[in-house]
Amino acid sequence: MAPDPLGAARLSRRTVLAGTAGALGALTLPGVATAAPVDWSRAVVDSTMKRHTPATLGGWGYTRGLYLYGQYLVYRRTGEKSYLDYILAWYDRFVTDSGISNGFTNLDAMRSGQMFPLLYTETGQAKYKTAADQLRARFPSYPRTSDGGMFHATSRVGQLWADGVYMAQPFLALYGKTFGDAAYCYEEAAKNVSVYFDHLKEPAKGLLYHAYDEDGSEPWASGAGRHSKYHWGRAIGWLGMTAIDLLEILPRDHPRRRRLVEVVKFLAAGYTRWQDRASGRWFQVVDRGGDKDNWLETSASAMYTFLLSRAVQRGYVGPEYGPVAAKGHRGVLSQVSTNPEGLTDIANISEGTNVGDTAYYYARKRNTNDFHGLGAFLIMNEQLVR
């Protein structure tokens, strides 16, 4: 049989990833020259920039905002100016000297605004503060449940989806810190995490349900708790990352910090319990790994790994969670590959997902290079590259 150089390269690369504990992987063998470490964050960003110009990256939406925030973290570590220039070029498609024209009628539309305070800090350009002010002004009138939870969308009356807090609350807290509006912004952001968590938590499993409907009128909210019935992976990851992000911003004496730490501890224990021991990753429906149609999903696995690693680093949980994070990181890295064109691919990322039953979740497309996964990967990897 003729030699298969591509197959050998794949085997070598898999060996590198399987033994990687940090974000930079290299294979070391006695008597053999050490290969240069691979910076997988750079590889993902470089490949994405080759695939898409700022003009073709896509329209305003949370997935692009998630990805570009991840790219921004890589820029902050590396100082690679082209990474920031690319981000600015995309945002400048939507932000003018007059700010941004957007009604912000759903939380998803707010996620990309996370970058407004950051871009203002980087450039000093007033238009980014104008856009940030416009988004901030939307919050007081944005509709809420009776206990203060922001609707997932104005059209989804009374509904709280675990995804939603990540779309809005990190921006609000960062705005408060950057522009001196802490009293309102810190309280509102942290309160929403608490409200969502109280409606969605399942203490017996250490997990969250996907969504809650205040009046129980949705078919999926027919039970006593008026929440959906299943534990969809990425929804839980969104809320966990929100708690971590807010803890980075809120001062140590803020009265809601303790509750946020409790959320992180709850999720860290749940993530550990339900991690797939063979792969280090997590399933689409987290607690039903034995179902034949269920599958291991990359974006949620990256989110869980990020929370676990940051929680250990900050002392929110004990060091015993460190090996869980390391195993999760190796599991996510196993989904990263280099294709014949020399570009980096990340596999097994769920497409965008509404609330559904198990058959619906299992049937979601398993995309490669979906921006949900690219963004989550960069956030995770930049945490572990430290």
Image (spheres, grey):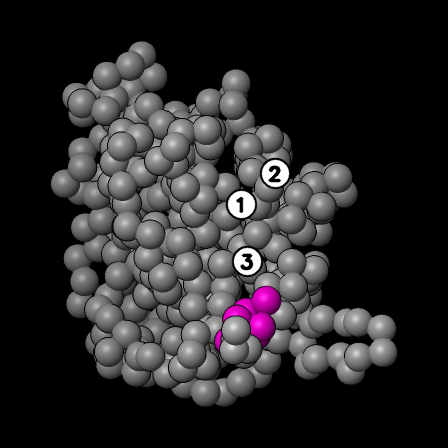
Residue 268 visible in the snapshot: no
Res. 204 mark: none
Q: Nearer the viewer, residue 171 or 271?
A: 271
Please say whether residue 8 is one of the residues in the magenta stretch: yes
Cα–Cα span, label 1 and label 3: 10 Å
Q: In this rendering, which labeled residue sits more in front, label 1 or label 3? A: 3
- Give the residue at x 59% y 67%: 11
* Location of residue 86 in the rendering, given as x and y in whole percent from the top left corner: 38, 82
Q: Which residue is mark 2?
A: 277
Q: Which residue is mark 3?
A: 334
* Location of residue 87 in the rendering, given as x and y in whole percent from the top left corner: 38, 78
Vertical placement of residue 375 versus 280, above or below = below
* Residue located farthest toward the left when viewing the structure as drawn: 155
Q: Residues within 10 Å of mark 3 (few under 14, many from 20)?
A: many
Identify the magenta region.
6-11
Q: State the SS at label 2.
A: loop
Chief secondary structure of the magenta portion: helix
Q: Is residue 291 left or right of residue 20?
A: left
Q: Is residue 224 left or right of residue 13?
A: left
Q: Which residue is mark 1?
A: 281
Which amino acid type corresponds to the residue marked 2 in the rendered image?
Arg
Please say whether residue 213 is one of the residues in the magenta stretch: no
- Give the residue at x 37% y 83%: 50
- Of callouts 3 and 2, which one flags the residue occurring earlier in the amino acid sequence? 2
Which amino acid type corresponds to the residue marked 1 in the rendered image?
Arg
The answer to whether mark 1 and mark 3 are in CB contact below 8 A is yes
Q: Residues within 10 Å of mark 1 (few under 14, many from 20)?
A: many
Q: Nearer the viewer, residue 70 or 322?
A: 322
- Give the residue at x 70% y 80%: 35
